[in-house]
Image (tube, grey):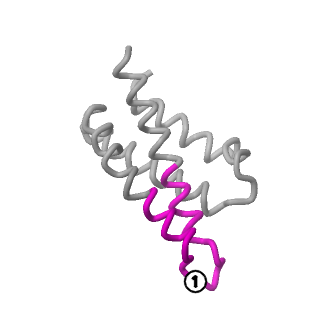
Amino acid sequence: MDLYEALAAKIAEYDSGSVGGEVPGFDAWDDAARDYLEAVCKSVAEGESALSVYERMKADLPRLEELVEAEEASYTFDWYDDHYYIKIYSGQVQACKFVLSLCEALVSE
């Protein structure tokens, strides 16, 4: 399975509702993870290599983790949910780590 197929399969899991058991009730989290994966999948479909995606994810992960830490220290108020942004950033971290693991598995093959 190549990177595009693996990403598409994970997105399909989100669409079917079979992902999310790890953090029940965090729809914003799951939506953010799915959207992140969809953006990566689109870039792969447009020709971005697995190595390029890997390097981009390695660079993006610290930024996302800093956003989570900042929200944990002092959350951004949102009328929708006091912890809305931490859910968004955490979902993106989860997706980024998933993509990194996919890329590492592909490189090791």
Q: Quadrant of the N terminus?
A: top left
Q: Is residue 78 above or below residue 8?
A: below
- Total residue callouts: 1
Residue appearing at x 46%, y 32% in the figure? 101
- Residue drawn at 56 percent across, 76 percent down: 75
Q: Nearer the viewer, residue 104 or 8?
A: 104
Placement of the C terminus among the 4 image quadrants: top left
Res 22 → quadrant: top right
- Residue 20 horizontal/vertical position (percent): 68, 48
Question: Does residue 52 appear left or right of residue 72 in this picture?
Answer: left
Task: Count neighbours of disc 1 (C-alpha within 10 A) and say few if under 14, some if 14 to 19, many if 20 or more.
Answer: few
Indicate the amino acid at tag 1: Phe
Tell me where residue 18 appears, x and y as whole percent: 70, 41
Of helix, strand and loop, which one carries label 1? loop
Query: Looking at the picture, does residue 79 appear above or below residue 34?
Result: below
Considering only vertical position in the picture, is 38 above or below 50?
Answer: below
* Residue 76: % across, % down: 54, 79
Residue at the image point whose x is 54% and y is 43% from the top: 11
Task: Please give the residue where the numbered disc 1 appears in the rendered image.
Answer: 77
Main SS, magenta region, reads helix
The residue depicted at 44 percent of the width and 49 percent of the height is 38
Percent of width and height locating residue 39: 39, 51
In terms of image quadrants, where is residue 91? bottom right
* Residue that extends furthest to the front in the rendered view of this protein: 73
Q: Which residues are magenta?
A: 65-93
- In the figure, is residue 91 to the left or right of 106? right
Indicate left or right for 94 with 51 as reference: right
Seen in the picture, residue 46 relative to 30 is either above or below; the reply is above
